[in-house]
Amino acid sequence: MLYSTKTPEQKRQQFRELLASGTIQQFPGAFNPLSARLIEEKGFPGVYISGAVLANDLGLPDIGLTTLTEVATRAGQIARMTDLPAIVDADTGFGEPMNVARSVQELENAGLAGCHIEDQFNPKRCGHLDGKNVVDLETATKRIRAAADARRDPNFLIMARTDIRATEGLEAAQDRARALVEAGADAIFPEAMKDLSEFQAIRDAVDVPILANMTEFGQSALFTVEELAGVGVNMVIYPVTLLRSAMGAAERTLDAITTTGSQEAEVGNMLTRARLYDLVDYEAYNRFDTGVFNFQVPGTN
Ligand SMILES: C[C@](O)(C(=O)O)[C@H](CC(=O)O)C(=O)O
Ligand SMILES: [Mg+2]
């Protein structure tokens, strides 16, 4: 009821244990707080919060237009609706290394279990598009060092994302991944890997957990969780998947209303009223209300 029953510290500890478990972890992307509850109910171990989704949800393209305040607020709303650890996409960290330090503290305050910070130039773009630029090694490592030094909870996970594969190739990505770990990264997100052997190459380069981004319509094929586990990937995200599904469903329903004059044809695909009430834990609020209001004050009647 109301919100998570676990503290952010407990969730960060839980996240560290999941990553150390030796089993690959699947984190679907929540597009709002309610979808985080659905992810938890379906048995997933954690929630991803995508920068692309946060931007697109506001009707904006994913080019670094969202502010730290917007991202921390929305990510916090999502994180507090679930007992699962939630990690957030912090883009380039919202500025210079000093800003990155502040960003990490704000995301800690918002109850997140970790974040990833990438080595793109600002304005950044989706990692699966052409025309990306990455910052030099010194700038990239300074961002990560600032992030790692700024956290107060040692379990808050700092993941370094590198976009360098697209511009300088796989060996450069291996070198950069090693340098980012050296700078304090707890995990590596190698962006836009072309095939499984590339994930394997990153696995061979570093000892920390690595993440695979299974975003649709991108550079990587949609590998199965078994395939990714086979090359040593520790966690996989489906960042925009639920937003794409939900918006696809919304478009079909709007078209049905237009073409048939009613939404009737789509009702079977909708979450029922009962399921929706279930997700918001309606029943528990009823019980709470009854408990509060059904009492007698001794001696007054
Ligand atoms: C993972 C990602 O950074 C995101 O914001 O979700 C995006 C996803 C996408 O645009 O499909 C990315 O840059 O890969
Ligand atoms: Mg992003």
Image: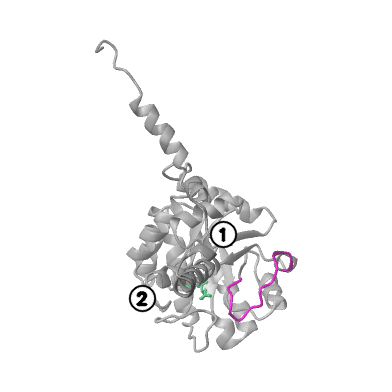
Number of residues whose C-alpha sits closer than 10 Å to that of mark 2, classed few (under 14), some (14–19) or many (20 or more)? few
Q: From what the image shows, is residue 84 above or below residue 141?
A: above
**Residue 265 location (% of width, % of height):** 54, 65
Q: Residue at x 43, y 45 (%)?
A: 3
Range drawn in magenta: 214-227
User: On the picture, is 263 further left or further right than 14?
Assistant: left
The residue at which mark 1 appears reads as 268
User: Within the magenta stretch, is there residue 212?
Assistant: no
Q: Quadrant of the N terminus?
A: top left
**Residue 82 location (% of width, % of height):** 49, 49
Residue type indicated by callout 2: Leu
Q: From what the image shows, is residue 289 above or below residue 235?
A: above
Q: Element at badge 2?
A: loop
Which numbered disc covers residue 84?
Answer: none
**Residue 107 location (% of width, % of height):** 40, 59
Q: Residue at x 66, y 77 (%)?
A: 221
Identify which residue, 58 or 49, lies in the foreground: 58
Residue type indicated by callout 1: Gly
Count of numbered badges drawn on the protein: 2
Identify which residue, 149 or 208, lies in the foreground: 208
Report, in whole angstroms, how far the alpha carbon at label 2 lies from the one at label 1: 37 Å
| Residue 267 visible in the shown view | yes
**Residue 266 location (% of width, % of height):** 53, 64
Residue most extreme to the front? 261
Residue most extreme to the top? 299
Q: From what the image shows, is residue 93 above or below residue 136?
A: above
Determine the image quadrant of residue 150. Answer: bottom left
Number of residues whose C-alpha sits closer than 10 Å to that of mark 1, classed few (under 14), some (14–19) or many (20 or more)? few
The residue at which mark 2 appears reads as 65
Query: Which comes before the other along the chain, label 2 or label 1?
Result: 2
